[in-house]
Image (cartoon, coloured by chain):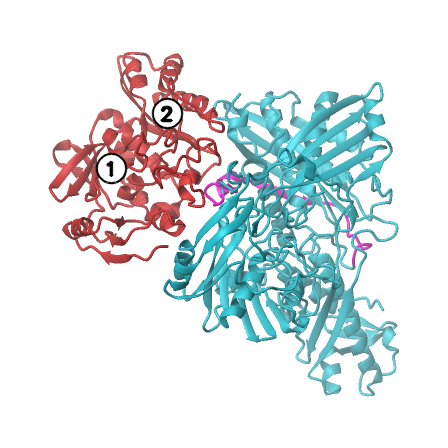
Chain colours: A cyan, B red
Amino acid sequence: MSTPTISPLVLGKPMNRVDGRLKITGAAKYAAEFSPPGVLHAFALTSKISKGRIAVIDTAAAELAPGVRTVLTHRNAPKLDQPNPSKNAGGGILNEERLPLNDDVISYGGQYVAFVVAQTLEQARHAASLIAITYEEAPPALTSKDAPDSGEKPKKNNGEAVQLKKGDADKGLAEKGLVVIERIYETPTETHSPMEPSATVAEWESKDRLTLHDATQYVKGVQDILAQTFNLKLENVRVLSPFVGGAFGCKGAVWPHLILTAMAAKVVGAPVKFALSRQDMFTGAGHRTPTMQTIALAATPQGELRAIRHRTETLTSHVGEFVESAGARSSGVMYACPAIAVEETVFKVNVATPTFMRAPGECPGTFALESAMDELAVALKMDPVALRLANHATQHPIKEKPWSTNHLPDAYRLGAEKFGWARRTAEPRSMQKDGLLVGWGMATATYPGYKMAAVANIHLSADGTAVVQCAAHDIGTGAYTVLTQISAEAIGLPVEKMKFELGDSDLPFGPVAGGSNTTATVGSAIYDAADALHLALAKLASADAASPLHGIPPAQIVMVGPGQMAGRNGPGKSDSFAEILRRAGKEFIEEKGSFKPPLVFQPGVAFQSFGAQFCEVKIDPALPRVQVTRFVSVMDCGRVMNAKTARSQILGGVVMGIGMALEEETIYDRATGLPATRNLADYHVPVNADIPEIDVHFVGEPDFAFNPMGARGMGEIGITGTAAAIANAVFHATGIRVRSLPITLDKLLA
Amino acid sequence: MNPFQYSRAADAPQALAGLAHQPKTKLLGGGTNLIDLMKMGVETPAQIIDITRLPLAQVEELPGGKGVRVGALARNSDVAAHALIVQRYPVLSEALLAGASPQLRNMATVGGNLLQRTRCPYFYDPAFSACNKRQPGSGCGALEGFNRSHAILGQSQQCIATHPSDMCVALAALDAVVRVQGPNGEREIPFADFHRLPGDTPEHETNLAPDELITAVDLPTSAWMARSHYLKVRDRASYAFALVSVAAAIEMEDGKIKTVRIALGGVAHKPWRAVAAEEMLIGKPAEEAAFRAAADVAVAGAKGYQHNTFKIELARRTIVRALTNVAKA
């Protein structure tokens, strides 16, 4: 049934965050702020080597230290069941597959080697410092060059092909009369660095019931993995995550600390709290793997692409799989081209396990492809926007299916207009001002429209208020607010009467807050639940002799106003939610709805968002630190659900892209394999002074083929293309092409 | 974090008695560096004496026009905003404001800033076992490791760490004097002698004796000090340690340079006065050619490593720019 609803016109409005007041007053409680009575505190000791084994571990002094309750190591840790993420539908994510403290093997620097639980955090930390370890150490492999034989070519990533072949790219590159460029681009290891480090509070209610307060993007995933690991019934594990202080992907999988904390709480028989230190966040919660991408492009002198070849090398650990599909997710979707070849190779090294970080694949992939397109434009003496317009893909280039909607050319045009691109002079160093080099660059952004599975529950009370529930997440994105708006619109009630609950595994199924899917997925389930609710109310009214709608077939009863229903063909008579429930003697009515899509492609169409990024940099030629001075971001993501939170999503993506372009790099010490930049003084993310005005615009139309709201996600697309736009602007300003991020001033000193 | 004793000193003699009684004592000022290092396990004092109640937070004029005295417990933010400092020693105000963040500057004290420890990752993170400064004789992890932030001047095979302070670079240019109090009374340490080069004992960073308390920094008075400037070059627009910084001052007479000061930060184990470069500028016109020649002299003995060789050229350019700025001012 698809009951048309009367829109209270809340969708699209720049509504303030419903949780804003809780956050700014400190009332919003984050995982580490939960302190059950008797809670103990844990501190993890991490490995100082990256490859080898623990020969001797002496915990005697630590065990005797004041306040210490237990010291867990591989020698005394309880043996747990190996969880299988694909065992259950909608199962959890396990990037690092090895269970913590499982054996004496060290696979990466920073690996947890002991877990100390004490009355206070300070006692635990002090006791950890008393543990003496003798390692058998071997030289670590840190790069693909150190482990050339470990390379593997994965077939799929999240169910999608990653080795792509369309036409014959090698042949296309060798064709006569074409302009060909081939370049190598590198992106470094990047670490998510959310404000809130990961944290878990584990409490065993009884020997078969576990409650976790956890900073996670996936309460149902944590529930699944923990239930398997500790051999518990799924419903006996409860995971709560009402607020998350940023995640960007590092809180999507179940990391070892979750299992360690639950294990320790079981051993000591008391609740245990463990908050990762900032140092731990560089090895214990994933990172973006470094990429080395070799891109070859061939185009006619008029700028028509004839061949794209995109080869990517990335790294993963010895204890977990992760594929960063830089080629498939950029060159595999971006341009119309008769020959596209994408190859991805993953090498195993002695570094912690990588994970998804905001636009995994698209983000490094668009840096490389969109830098290469700029180099091609220079080689062709063609305007970078014109080159992209000339190669606009009117259908998915690999799948050869039409897009559900695609307004990328509008994004280029509007972006160029807002930015003033027409005033750009093409020659590098040609736009100096006040002694500074001025550079203008642009790039294309892209991210797929993803949907997952979800169930939503609507609880409508006779007083005209409703609570809508789904085990979804708000990791700072504004999901609480947007899902409240969608609920109001779908049900047909004012937003003030709505409450949305999320972040609790006891609620109906919600997907990982990943792949920018929450709005599309959970919103679709809300619409389905609203349909069920309207039908149930219509049945009550139809069957009720006292109702003005008595006798009208329920399928003919529709929404006509906020909380008001009437016969489709019979104007004049209407009934209200409140009256229907009152007469039925019900205090409330509850209905569920669900959504189960194919992951990306519905038959016949491809769902993909695109955008255009334009940026200006100013650089002092003598002291060449890059300052981004203007940024225009124009996105086509379908319908905008909330003008304010949507803009914030794109702003955040661009800010993070500026960090990627200019500052972020996790550096590993050659000798030990330990990160040498594992704090926020050495690992730079942008500060306010680095960020200019960012002018965000949206183009396009509602994508109703995608979901009832017509909206595709916005969480990730803002970072894509940003680094390339900046690198291209830096080239335009200086004449120096930097192909290895970040663009620090030493790379421009020449 | 090591267990430690905490007490609060009511006056200087109490603090000094505590220092004399327990050699493993640290004095607590703003705590912005010390507490961090204690959490990391780098500093493991047996005793902490909180000296924040000592009456040493004044910024005041010395009698007889002899300059300005800045108390050791004056907060960085207060010093930076003080009218006497802004008017007479702009280089010091600018340097302070170029350091850290407003929150840190509100806590950090002048005395603590003098004693800031290096941000070398091999020193700061005890997971790295090689650090001669933290563990004498254990080696230097930075020599063959990640050394982008490290020294190019005055370093040794034992240590290539840099001093992280901005304030101290300005004080080096201003010929400041550190006033300290010990069991045998007060003494003065000229700023150039306060910090040490690493040599074979990088664990000894200053010439302050373990039983001494810094009470103040004296700034002498000279007309040229009002024409001074701090230029900091770093990896982001704010809130980052210097790759290279320069404190510069120029006094002109008859179109020629009469007095000049050039001090560098981010390049050495201590704030680095480019004395030879200063000397060669005396009597020269304040022109770019002269500044370039002086900058070449300033980095003449510089040596770079795998990740920081760029600092030699960057130091040259920063000196030229700082001198140019101050000459124009």
- Do labels 1 and 2 touch, CB within 8 Å? no
Which residues are drawn in magenta?
A: A678-707
Whether residue A21 is visible? no
Q: Which residue corresponds to mark 2?
A: B153
Q: Amino acid at mark 1?
A: Leu
Q: Nearer the viewer, mark 1 or mark 2?
A: 2
Instruction: Determine whether, in the image, residue B24 is placed left or right of residue A612.
Output: left
Q: Which residue corresponds to mark 1?
A: B84
Q: From this view, report whether residue A415 is shown above or below residue A431.
A: below
SS for callout 2: loop
- Residue A516: image location, x then y, percent: 69, 52
Whether residue A526 is visible? yes
Judge whether residue B173 is colored magenta: no
Identify the subunit bearing mark 2.
B
SS for callout 1: helix
Is the magenta region chiefly helix, strand or loop?
loop
- Residue A536: image location, x then y, percent: 79, 77
